[in-house]
């Protein structure tokens, strides 16, 4: 029987029949993979406690096809302990990963960015930080996801005029084209100053607002119109 070993995290799980679960993982070795955890819903199952978000696991899959069988699974580190807002951010990252990533395709850089995001969110949780201090973690994660999927625009280039973006002009983001100069009074206009600040990771209220707008526009072709459920967890002053 064909068996493979993976390192990863649970993105999502859902009941399957009476006693089992279907689990979506994000793995270092093969990106997003799905597995059936037989008997994981039974009261005495030793797998149930490990099949949770925020827990790094090493596990074994057997069988063929896109839905394989989960065999051995064990934790490889302590579970992350996060504040409420940081936890909501992880739910958001997990949801967009599960919706955006193709099955069984390696995304090594994105996996490392995911782990970096978890570590940063844990550090921010310990410091009891505000939502605005968490936003750069989300934006950087989204931008790596977009780059890995080939949807990240060039933050320094005006595609329409074939010139560098300049601080004192305004631009709009057009998917599959990039930034193009526009009237500063248009609702979707983003200042060149803020675009360049985002490119430099120079985070302040204006650049955070611009980054959020850029991210939502760029992610739309990937995620579509279906609402992102995890956004509902946040208060009206949301980071996502």
Image (cartoon, helix red, strand yellow):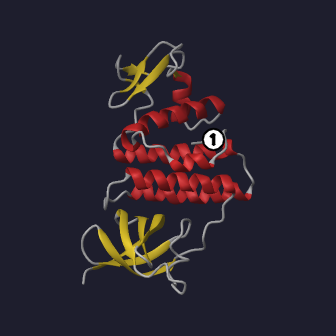
Q: Residue at x 31, y 59 (%)?
A: 105
Label 1 element class:
loop
Identify which residue, 89 or 120, lies in the foreground.
89
Identify which residue, 184 or 113, lies in the foreground.
184
In this rendering, the count of numbered labels is 1
* Residue 62, horizontal then vertical, whole percent: 31, 79
Furthest residue in direction front, as rendered: 18
Quadrant location, the N terminus: bottom left
* Residue 75, horizontal then vertical, whole percent: 52, 77
Q: In the figure, residue 152 lies in which quadrant?
A: top left
Q: Residue at x 25, y 80 (%)?
A: 2
Q: Residue at x 48, y 12 (%)?
A: 183
Q: Residue at x 49, y 74 (%)?
A: 57
Circle 1 residue: 238
* Residue 182, horizontal then vertical, whole percent: 45, 15
* Residue 121, horizontal then vertical, whole percent: 63, 55
Left or right for 30, reference 21: left
Quadrant location, the C terminus: top right
Furthest residue in direction bottom, as rendered: 44
Q: In the figure, residue 8 lies in which quadrant?
A: bottom left
Q: Residues within 10 Å of mark 1 (few under 14, many from 20)?
A: few
Residue 183 against residue 228 in the figure, above or below? above
Identify which residue, 85 or 8, lies in the foreground.
85
């Amino acid at each position: 029987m064909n068996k493979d070993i993976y390192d990863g995290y649970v993105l999502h799980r859902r009941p399957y029949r009476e006693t089992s679960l279907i689990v979506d993982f994000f793995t270092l070795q093969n990106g997003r993979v799905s597995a059936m955890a037989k008997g994981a819903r039974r009261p005495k199952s030793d797998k149930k406690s490990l099949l949770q978000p925020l827990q790094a696991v090493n596990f074994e899959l057997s069988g063929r096809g896109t839905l394989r069988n989960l065999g051995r699974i064990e934790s490889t580190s302590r579970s992350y302990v996060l504040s409420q807002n940081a936890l909501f951010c992880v739910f958001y990252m997990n949801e967009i990963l599960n919706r955006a990533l193709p099955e069984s395709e390696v995304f090594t850089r994105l996996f490392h960015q995911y782990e970096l995001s978890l570590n940063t969110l844990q550090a921010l949780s310990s410091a009891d930080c505000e939502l605005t201090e968490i936003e750069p973690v989300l934006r950087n994660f989204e931008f790596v996801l977009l780059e890995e999927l080939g949807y990240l625009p060039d933050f320094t280039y005006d595609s329409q005029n074939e010139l560098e973006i300049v601080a004192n002009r305004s631009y709009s983001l057009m998917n599959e084209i990039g930034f193009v100069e526009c009237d500063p009074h248009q609702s979707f206009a983003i200042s060149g100053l803020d675009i360049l600040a985002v490119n430099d990771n120079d985070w302040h209220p204006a650049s955070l607002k611009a980054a959020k707008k850029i991210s939502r526009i760029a992610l739309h072709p990937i995620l579509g119109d279906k609402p992102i459920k995890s956004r509902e967890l946040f208060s009206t002053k949301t980071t996502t």
